[in-house]
Every structure is written in C-alpha cells, then in structure tokens.
C-alpha cells in the first residue's frame, strides 16, 4: 500500500511526550470501542520509572499496599537481577479497578507505549470488566478505597501493637492466602432480620463504649482502637463445616485472635479473593489483550497512522511475546500462556472467516460466522481457562503446537504416549490440557472438617489428595505452624484419597 504523508502519522520518532500519548490514546480508543466493540472501564494512564515499576512488582502490582517485609525482600531481589541484566522489566502493569489504571514504563519507545495502551488499557480492561469471574468476585469500583483503608489500618496496628506482632499475623495470613478464598460460592449472607439485629447491637455497644473524655484530646491524637464489637453471627453455634476458606474460618472462630488480628485476616483474604479470578484466566486474559493489541496496531498501520518502522518494531515485540519454545529448548518452561491464548483467539477468527470442513465439524455453532469479534467477546465474558480450552481448542492448533498426551504413573518405570493426532486423540489431548488449568487440581483441596470450641480446642483439617499425591512434608509442617499460630491451639491434618 502507499503510505500517506509523514505529517499524518501519529508519531514518527521513538521519543514520546504526553501530547503524543494523549493523541495515540484517543485514536486507539476509537478503534477499540467503535470498531472492535470493546466495553471498558474509564482509563487512567500513568507513566512510571523503572524503580517505580520494580516497587509495583514487589507489592502485588497494586497502587496502594500495606507494609510488609516480604515486599522489601522481593524488591531487593528484583532490583539486583534487573541492574545485573539478568531480567527485564514488564512494559506495563494494569490494575483491575475503575478507573482502570495502566502503568507505562517511561523507558518505552512511542511505538511500545501505543502497543501497551492497546494491550492493557483496552485488552485487559475489557476482560476485567466483562468476564463473569471478575464480575462475580471483584469490586473494581471499590478496590482502591479498600486498599487505602487496609494500608492505613495496618499502619495504625503497627503503631499501637508493634511491627513484630503485626508482621507475625501477616506472615501467617500470607502463608494461607491460597486457602483464603471462596471457590464455589459467595460468603454466607445472614438474613435481613439477623442483619438488623446485628446493627442494633452494634449501635447499643457504641453508645455504651462512648466516652466524653476522648473529646478533650489535643488535635491529631486518636483514641485507641475500639475493643471487639459483639457480633451475633459469631456465636460459634453453626460453623457450617466442612469449610474450604481456612482464613475465613479462623477469622470467625479462632478462640485466640483479637479484634485487630481478625480484621487483618479479613484484609488478606479480601486481597486473595480479588486475585482469585486472575489465577483462573491467565491464558484467556493475556490472549485477549495480545489479540486486541495485534488488531489495533495493524489497524493503525492500515489507516496510515503509524509507519513501517513502527510496524516492524511492534511485530518484533509481538512475536517475542507469543514465542513458544520447543520442549528440548533451554528456554522451555511449559506452555506460554501468551502463545496459547493468542493462538486460540487468532484461530477462532480464522474459523469464522475461513473455516475448513474439519472446523465446521468441530465448531458448527460459529464456523463461518462473519462477526468473529462477537464470538470472541462472548467467550471472553463466559469462560475461564479450563472451560475455554475444553470448548475452543481446535485440531489445527493442536497440530501447530505439536501437542500429544503422556500417560504418567509413579508406579511405572516409563512414560507412555496415550493420545496423538487422530479423532479420539484430539479430544483426549484437549481434555487433559484443560485439566492442567483447573485450579481445583493445581491447588491442594484442604478443608476444615472439625473444630472443638468448648473442650480441648483441637482443629482438624483434611487434605483430599488428587491422584493419591500427598502434600510436601516439609512445607506441610511449615504451613501448619502458621495455622496453629492463628488458631492458638493444636491443629491436626489428615490426608485422604479424594477418589475413596
């Protein structure tokens, strides 16, 4: 094609300024919203330094975070590796919030700034707003306020009770974050009558605990944190066992925790629940964002808004992101979620636009559908990695990735290829690959099954083993020590076969 005059380009140099960023953002938004029909939160774009990016790495990539020694340790490690040239920094970080915050690295070229705006501010943004897991489990509009509260609350506890005591509780809570989420249902909600009774008792308690003496304190001095408020939900009567959310159970029923410690556990499990959807949608989330930035950057070139140099720079970065090393490559570290995610999104587009007889046989519901973006938006909204792979992975893509299945049993001395490229093999490969993204298999199934609140206070946990695989012995005892710290009494763990 004949390129337009240079003056019509959004940018022609690698250097950027905020006026150019703003101009590119507006054009990218027009393509994303009007052409791709993406539905996004309002965007907040921030450009940060490499040190700020490292700081974001170390604090769970959140814009606000309470203090904890592990964040500083991670920062020191990442900074050392980065300064020594062993690792590179991410081009961006995006926050699931409303407005959606995208951090851009100031060292990026203008082409890379445009790419990461498309990737984060519109690809990830759309996925955060529309996927059912994020809609069910996260509150994008309230997370920033909650983080501000958590940061202030932990700081106040450190001032009042000492940093050592606070960090000890945080250490134990962090160790149990993976077991601090509700996986299959929302937290139990009391009836309206019980909620009204709870609010009535809270008001009565606050009136009884109020003291006029606090009005005489000089400005800037805060009264001590209030003692625990009686909660009619915590009568210890019905614990609804078994309970999968161990942090929730400890917060509600531990005989030894003080009010501020319970609130600290609530903060940590709220963050764990916030990140829970991201653990289940890595392939889809990155695939969506990568597909969106690829579509937008190519559309910018087709419109004559970026030059050939920018196109080549974008393609070089894109192909590096979606590169999948072979199994015998030194760089191989499993299946690249960017490669698999983008490959599946691009394959869905191919099946819609240029279906083969095989595609029509495997995907009769959408093969030949001219509106591929409608199919993608529907998939982005209603699936997670496991179900998305089970429904949309095609035989062609399995051939492209050269996938096959291995039969692996600890009791047998050799591997056996159990599925190859044939009709039954395709379905077996797809199903086994999907199982690898099932968080119920990837993480141990540990539940509270019994608790003696009136006698010896013994707590019993049960691990239902998948395929007879027990917990790592050393790690198990280390984590149980954290449970005992929060429970305050003896804790036992039994392991049973889930298939028994």
Image (cartoon, rainbow, N blue to C red):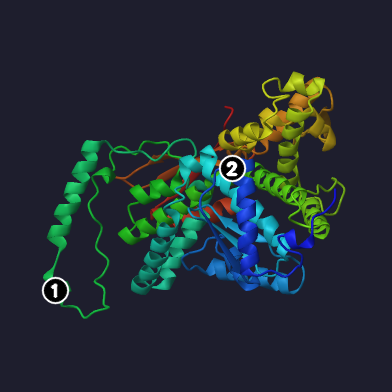
The disc, 1 or 2, on the residue closer to the chain's N-terminal end is: 2
- Crowding at mark 1 (Cα within 10 Å: few <14, some 14-19, many 20+): few
Q: SS for tag 1?
A: helix
Which residue in the protein does label 1 denote?
213
Residue 428 sits in quarter: top right
- Crowding at mark 2 (Cα within 10 Å: few <14, some 14-19, many 20+): many
Which of the two marks, 1 or 2, is nearer to us in this view? Answer: 2
Q: SS for tag 2?
A: loop
Q: Is residue 482 left or right of residue 323?
A: left
- Considering depth in this image, is 269 or 354 the residue closer to the camera? 354
Q: Can residue 402 be seen in this view?
A: no
Horizontal and vertical percent for residue 121? 60, 53
- Considering depth in this image, is 436 or 282 the residue closer to the camera? 282
Horizontal and vertical percent for residue 48? 60, 69
Toward the right, the furthest residue is 328
Q: How far apart are marks 1 and 2 (CA)?
A: 56 Å
Q: Is residue 240 visible?
A: yes
Residue 188 sits in quarter: top left
Which residue in the protein does label 2 denote?
38
Q: Is residue 423 left or right of residue 81?
A: right
Horizontal and vertical percent for residue 473? 61, 50
Residue 206 sits in quarter: bottom left
Q: In this view, does 245 lie to the left or right of 277?
A: left
Q: In this view, does 395 lie to the left or right of 226?
A: right
Q: Tell me the quarter of the image containing the C terminus.
A: top right
Q: Residue at 77% of width from left, 32% of height from top?
A: 350
């Amino acid at each position: 094609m004949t390129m337009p005059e240079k003056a019509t380009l959004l940018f022609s140099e690698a250097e950027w300024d905020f006026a150019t960023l703003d101009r590119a953002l507006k054009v990218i938004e027009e393509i994303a919203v009007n052409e791709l029909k993406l539905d996004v939160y309002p965007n907040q774009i921030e450009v940060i330094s490499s040190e700020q990016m490292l700081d974001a790495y170390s604090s769970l990539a959140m814009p606000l975070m309470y203090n904890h020694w592990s964040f500083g340790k991670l920062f020191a490690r990442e900074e050392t590796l980065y300064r020594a040239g062993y690792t590179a920094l991410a081009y961006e970080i995006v926050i699931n919030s409303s407005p959606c915050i995208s951090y851009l690295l100031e060292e990026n070229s203008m082409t890379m700034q445009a790419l990461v705006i498309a990737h984060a501010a519109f690809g990830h943004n759309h996925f955060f707003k529309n996927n059912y897991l994020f809609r069910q489990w996260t509150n994008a509009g309230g997370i920033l306020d909650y983080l501000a509260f958590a940061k202030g609350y932990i700081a106040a506890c450190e001032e009042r009770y000492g940093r050592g005591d606070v960090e000890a509780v945080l250490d134990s809570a962090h160790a149990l974050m993976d077991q601090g989420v509700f996986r299959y249902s929302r937290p139990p909600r009391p009836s309206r009558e019980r909620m009204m009774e709870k609010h009535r008792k809270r008001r009565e308690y606050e009136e009884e605990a109020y003291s006029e003496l606090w009005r005489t304190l000089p400005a800037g001095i805060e009264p001590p944190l209030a003692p625990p408020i009686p909660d009619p939900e915590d009568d210890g009567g019905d614990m609804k066992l078994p309970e999968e959310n161990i942090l929730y159970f400890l917060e509600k029923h531990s005989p030894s925790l003080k009010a501020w410690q319970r609130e600290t556990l609530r903060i940590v499990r709220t963050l764990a629940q916030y990140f829970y959807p991201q653990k289940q949608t890595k392939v889809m989330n990155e695939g969506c964002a990568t597909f969106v930035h690829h579509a937008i950057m190519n559309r910018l070139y087709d419109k004559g808004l970026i030059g050939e140099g920018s196109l080549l720079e974008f393609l070089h970065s894109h192909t590096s992101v979606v590169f999948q090393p072979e199994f015998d490559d030194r760089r191989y570290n499993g299946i690249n979620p960017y490669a698999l995610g983008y490959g599946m999104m691009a394959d869905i587009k191919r099946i819609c636009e240029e279906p083969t007889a095989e595609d029509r046989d495997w995907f009769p519901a959408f093969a030949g559908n001219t509106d591929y973006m409608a199919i993608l938006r529907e998939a982005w909204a209603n699936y997670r990695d496991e179900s998305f792979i089970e429904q949309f992975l095609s035989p062609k893509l399995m051939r492209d990735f050269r996938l096959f299945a291995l039969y692996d049993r600890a009791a047998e001395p050799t591997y056996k290829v159990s599925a190859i490229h044939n009709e039954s093999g395709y379905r077996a490969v797809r199903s086994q690959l999907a199982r690898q993204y099932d968080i119920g298999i990837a993480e141990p199934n540990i539940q509270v099954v019994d608790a003696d609140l009136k006698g010896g206070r013994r707590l019993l946990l049960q691990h239902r083993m998948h395929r007879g695989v027990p917990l790592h012995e050393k790690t198990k005892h280390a984590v149980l020590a954290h449970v005992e710290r929060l429970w305050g009494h003896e804790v036992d763990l039994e392991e049973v076969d889930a298939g028994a």
